[in-house]
Amino acid sequence: MKLLENICYAQRGSEQLCLDLYLPDERVFDVFVYFHGGGLESGHKGNAAVKTIAPWLAAHGIAVAAADYRKYPCAAYPDFVRDAAAAVHWVSCHIGAYGTCKRLFVGGSSAGAYLSMMLCFDARWYGECGEFSIPVVGYFHDAGQPTAHFNVLRERGIDSRRVIVDDTAPLYHISDAQAYPPMMLVVADDDMPSRFEQIQLVRAALRHFDYDESKLTYRLMHGKHCSYNTRVDELGDSVLGKMVFEWVTSL
């Protein structure tokens, strides 16, 4: 496994936005673009969850691009969504310099899954980036907020506990679900307040818009919000990494 750190994928004024590439020893591989959590205000591409998941996946033949993005208080909606789209676009167009990409997947945990859902359900963000060399063929949404994100609400002076579905909410954009690629939804049985119910609403909305349920994988985890992200099992395998691996290789 080879780790290449701080590769610039976009320039925002004087700020460079970077990602880390975890590359398998093999030259032909699937690629998983992963966005970390942290409420759109904290976290980074080298946090404990990434350090648990990414090396494990690379050791099992799946390359990982772990990307940073702008956050509060220095960012405002939709800066972080645009950054996420730019990161995926960069990987699509440049991963060929590091090996042969068989398939491209996108996912995230918590706030990172809010970003992955926005990219999955609202095509305009990719549309701003230009042509993709490799299309995204699947999305892994781990306990993301499908309603308006609580920190987006806070930015607008709205009680962050409110459950609002507007243009900033992934749910708002679910429509022609038959066109969506395969995806996986993960949530915990003792997740953040209302997060479990919100994920069930995503499942219901996809069904309502005739999404092929054979393309949807759902996993209910035991414990707190994203507590499994840094967990390893009795064999020493990354719990979340193994979930991603089994999902990707099943497609």
Image (cartoon, rainbow, N blue to C red):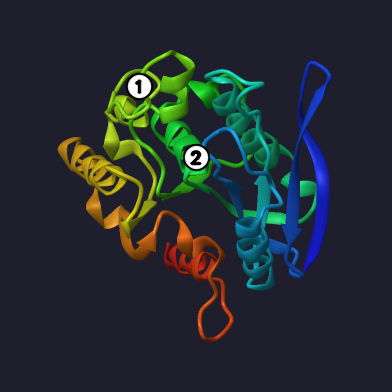
Which quadrant holds the N terminus?
bottom right
* Res 116 visible: yes
Which residue is found at the position 42% from the left and 26% from the top? 122
Say which amino acid is labelled 2: Ala
Residue 158 falls in which quadrant of the image? top left
Residue 186, x across and y down, in percent: 37, 55
* Res 30 visible: no
Residue 47, x across and y down, in percent: 67, 53
Work out whether 142 lies above or below 75.
Answer: below
Q: In the rendered structure, find residue 159 and report the number of the disc placed on it.
A: 1
Say which amino acid is labelled 1: Asp
Which residue is found at the position 65% from the left and 58% from the top? 48
Which residue is found at the position 79% from the left and 53% from the top? 98
Q: Residue furthest bottom?
A: 235
Residue 71, x across and y down, in percent: 62, 29
Is residue 44 left or right of 166 when viewed as pictured?
A: right
- At mark 2, the secondary structure is helix
Work out whether 28 lies above or below 198.
Answer: below
Is residue 236 left or right of 188 when viewed as pictured?
A: right
Work out whether 210 lies above or below 218.
Answer: above
Few, some or many residues within 10 Å of mark 2 (<14, 14–19, 20+): many
